[in-house]
Image (cartoon, grey):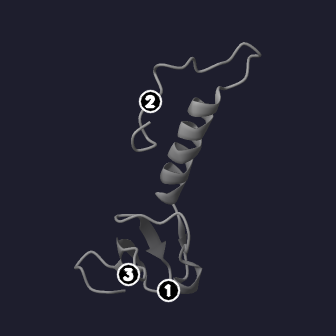
Amino acid sequence: MADGYEVPDHVPMVDGRGMVSLPWAQLLSRWQRVTSSLTDSGTTAQRPTSALWIGRTFFDTTLGKPVWVKQVRPAVVWVDAAGTVA
């Protein structure tokens, strides 16, 4: 998997024991983190500090609006829809 989000179509989804194979389990775990982040909300102090990527969204209940990660390194920068640091 080049970027960790490609479907591992070269590997069966279920192994011989009836368990989800490791490449599929890893992909599904990544997809779950991404999709659950679409509904994340909380106060400014509760913003996520891990599993961050540029474009990750969070509804900030302190500000009453969604914010997005603009930068991850060297420090995390969150912005609102107008691009203003939030």
- Circle number at residue 7: 2
Q: Which residue is mark 3?
A: 77
Marks 1/3: CA distance?
Answer: 17 Å
- Circle number at residue 23: none
Q: Are marks 3 and 2 in contact (CB under 8 Å)?
A: no
Disc 1 or disc 2, which is closer to the eye?
A: 2
Which mark is first along the chain, 2 or 1? 2
Residue 64, given in percent of the width and then of the height, sits at 43, 81
Front-most of 62 and 27?
27
Secondary structure of the residue carrying numbered label 1: loop
Residue at (22% x, 79% y) in the render: 82
Which mark is first along the chain, 2 or 3? 2
Q: Which residue is mark 1?
A: 62
Q: Amino acid at mark 1?
A: Thr
The part of the image, by quadrant, that contains residue 69 is: bottom left
Residue at (40% x, 81% y) in the render: 74
Front-most of 63 and 8?
8
Which mark is first along the chain, 3 or 1? 1
Secondary structure of the residue carrying numbered label 3: strand
